[in-house]
Image (cartoon, helix red, strand yellow):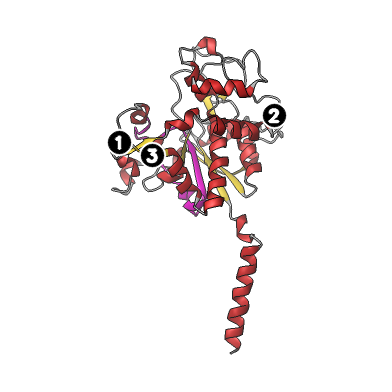
Amino acid sequence: MCSYRYSRLLGFFIFLLASLNVWADTPLYFVFDIDDTLARWVRPAESSLGNVTSSINDHRYRILDGAGEAIQALLTRAPNAKIVFYSGGPRDRNLELLSQLILPDGRRAIDIATKVLSRNDIVDEKSLPTGLAAWNELDRTPPSELHYDLRRHGRKDLLKAAPDLQNIVMIEDRLGYAYPGQEKNLLWVGTPPPSHPESFSETRLSRKAYIQYRNKLTRMVGLVDKALEVSKQEQIPLPDVLWKLQWHPAESGKLTYNTALLTDASIYRRGARLLAKTGSARYQFVTPQSEQNPKCLIPILRLLRQ
Ligand SMILES: [Mg+2]
């Protein structure tokens, strides 16, 4: 009798906790790649003007558009967010680079990092489990950059970053780094062009490709914002939402990247709003037009469809 009463009490207590949304505090880990996601080694032929680090192991790095803003925006958008950096670069290089990546509120990326994983944490191809890779289902016909991205560099095992895959988003420019069975956690920011243009006049990229590249972190934050909304509304784990948004069955029955995301103005608008909210003086949505007139975001977004 007594134990029955206790079990009912316990049940009521659990219900109360759930109602108060206590478990909403479960940490949500954003695992950032560094090279060509947040920063880019400045090649000898490239301009070193703009937001560029001092020399680190004889290299300077361009902090890519919206990098500090994107990190701060995610911390604000999801108050339970934790930031992990996971890069194939050497640890001393990563720590120094992250100390030079400054958020709009003045904190350094290294200050807000829950963990920094580096070259020694990359899992060698030879020690991988086999037969799990969802990428086997990927349509390898166009877009051809997917071939390039699937080149193997070793893998990033997200369980080194956090204990629960349901609460991890990996932000990465190379699909090939996804650990077998963890592909759903990946938010792909797209393949970088061969050289980084600081202005439209420096590049042979089309207007659309230029906008998509320079604003990839704006698009990433917009996509996270949308995925969090869908996850909450439909009670679906975030990695499952990201998977559904990013990968669609092609006519062949295989998976292909949902390229409509690259031109979806609503996604960029969501991201731009969150990045602007950080109060950054540096952030702007970059387009050929914005380089002359930075205030006109809405007409500029129409360019994505052209
Ligand atoms: Mg990278």
Can you give x and y, in whole percent of width and height, for residue 32 in the image? 52, 38
Q: Amino acid at mark 2?
A: Ser
Q: Is residue 72 left or right of residue 197?
A: right
Which label is found at residue 248?
3
For marks 3 and 2 on the same chain, the one whose residue lies earlier in the sequence: 3
For disc 1, the neighbor class at 10 Å (few under 14, some 14 to 19, many from 20) is few
Can you give x and y, in whole percent of width and height, for residue 267 in the image? 55, 34
Relative to 127, say whether 106 is above or below: above
For marks 1 and 2 on the same chain, the one whose residue lies earlier in the sequence: 1
Q: Which residues are magenta?
A: 149-174
Q: Return the residue nearer the eye: 169 or 258.
A: 258
Q: Which secondary structure, mark 2?
A: loop
Which label is found at residue 251?
1
**From the image, which quarter does the N terminus lie in?**
bottom right
How far is disc 3 from disc 2 in space, using C-alphas? 35 Å
Residue 95 among those drawn in magenta: no
Q: Which residue corresponds to the image point at 48% horizontal and 46% vertical from the top-left?
A: 241
Q: Is residue 233 left or right of residue 174?
A: right
Q: Return the residue nearer the eye: 134 or 242.
A: 242
Relative to 248, say whether 67 is above or below: above
Residue 157 among those drawn in magenta: yes
Badge count: 3
Q: Identify the residue at the far top of this view.
A: 201
Q: Amino acid at mark 3?
A: His
How far is disc 1 from disc 3 in space, using C-alphas? 10 Å
Give the image quarter of residue 284. top right
Relative to 48, say whether 237 is above or below: below
Give the image quarter of residue 150. top left
State whether residue 73 appears in this view: yes
Judging by the rendered image, the residue that carries numbered circle 2 is 280
Q: Which secondary structure, mark 1?
A: loop
For disc 3, the neighbor class at 10 Å (few under 14, some 14 to 19, many from 20) is some
